Amino acid sequence: MNCEIKFEQIWRKSPEAVDFCPYRVCPIGAHSDHQKGRITGLAIDKGIHIAWSVKRNGVVEVVSLQFEKRAQWHVRGVSETRDGDWADYLRGATLELGRRYPLTCGISGVIEGSLPIGGLSSSAAVTIAFLSALCRANGIRPSENEIIEVAVASENHYVGVSSGKLDQSCELFCRKDHLLYLDTQDDHYELIPAAGHCKPWRIAIFFSGVERTLAGSKFNMRVDEARSAAYALKAFSGMGYGKFAQTCLRDVPRDIYEAYKDRLPEPWRRRAEHFYTEYGRVMEGAAAWRAGDIETFGRLITESGHSSIYNWETGSAELKTLYEIMCRTDGIYGGRFSGAGFKGCCMALIDPAYEDSIRRSVREAYISAFPALESNYSDYVCDSADGAIF
């Protein structure tokens, strides 16, 4: 791997280990984990590798093959103020891990991503791969739930992204050829195996070629709008309510939403509508997967994508176009944009018999719509995979 070669070039020795964390896709359940909803997930056989060795002096020194700046800090001296670069997720993770365990050793490491950035939760994957290395270097063995808590806290408190635990849970709990069915309210999950009679399927990833956008700042606003809807619904109905930051739509029964939804400001109503309908789609999707009904599961993925666009109101012009192209392409069971929806990629479950025609048709239609992105567009077909092992 390139990360091993780069490590040897920098430190003039071979790395002691190479750790891996897969990327993830969330077929159904998007934009609901921060409201304590239910989600589904699949890890894929592409992800983040980190080639690393122990540094006994406690210094962390990491290089990314995707970004230019080399980052460095001490495990017991992480600044409370972020630097504003790609390594902030890792600084935050070091800080959060150090609050739970004594850290004495750092690492030198080279990080390599196997797909373009955007939509597959590369930030969570790089954080988990890094934590795997840092934990091993210090001889500590946190539980999977502790790692999820550390990684989520890094995003929420250090980086400042109001995300839930969907990404990290998928990247740790998933297993090959199984659908993760997780309730983020109590962390109970089930790994549902693909039924033996299920039609063949693979996971297609279509990268829009858009990697950076100012619209990403809208993510936190969408979360606040959903919390505002929950807070208002509690007030309208006479339910007790506490702190705004601890309020979520899962606290509010759907019948209360139906009774008072017309009193909500339209943006808040749309966020709530997405949550309640997505909650139902997740349960229906889990049942369809268990029954081996890939067509119904795919239809629900597409419906989830529609709700994310029209109720959650996210998605760039490029990703919306990709979504529309997928909806009319033969051989795609279902698809939606992946991640927050402001940049990156779309995912789809496809019939492998149509793989070549799907890739050709989607590319031709997308490049026809956005010819300036031809050199940046790319597509991949992946299989499901095991989550990271601690």
Image: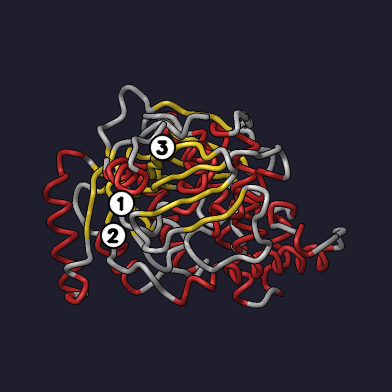
Q: Tag on residue 219? A: none
Residue type highlighted by circle 3: Phe
Asked if the residue under mark 2 is in contact with the one under mark 1, i.e. CB atoms within 8 Å, the reply is yes
Q: How is the image coloured?
A: secondary structure
Pointer 1 residue: 115
Instruction: Tell me which corner region of the image, top left, top right, bottom left or bottom right, holds residue 46.
Output: top left
**Residue drawn where x is 35% and y is 45% of the image:** 298
- The reply to whether residue 280 is visible in this rendering is no
Pointer 3 residue: 20
Circle 3 crowding by C-alpha within 10 Å: few under 14, some 14–19, many from 20: many
Pointer 2 residue: 207
Secondary structure under the numbered disc 3 in the rendered image: strand
Closer to viewer: mark 1 or mark 2: 1
Between 225 and 297, the residue placed more toward the observer is 225
Marks 2 and 3 sit apart, C-alpha to C-alpha, by: 22 Å
Q: Name the spot of residue 248 as percent of width and height, x first.
A: 71, 57
Quarter occupied by the N terminus:
top left
Secondary structure under the numbered disc 2 in the rendered image: strand
Closer to viewer: mark 2 or mark 3: 3
Between 331 and 78, the residue placed more toward the observer is 78
Between 16 and 196, the residue placed more toward the observer is 16
Q: Name the spot of residue 333 as percent of width and height, x first.
A: 29, 46
Circle 1 crowding by C-alpha within 10 Å: few under 14, some 14–19, many from 20: some
Looking at the picture, does residue 178 appear above or below residue 93?
above
Give the left or right position of residue 129, taking residue 261 as reference.
left
Q: Name the spot of residue 83 as percent of width and height, x first.
A: 56, 67
**Residue drawn where x is 32% and y is 44% of the image:** 3
Looking at the picture, does residue 262 appear above or below residue 172?
below
Q: Earlier in the sequence, mark 1 or mark 2?
A: 1
Circle 2 crowding by C-alpha within 10 Å: few under 14, some 14–19, many from 20: many
Looking at the picture, does residue 182 appear above or below residue 119?
above
**Residue drawn where x is 37% and y is 63% of the image:** 68
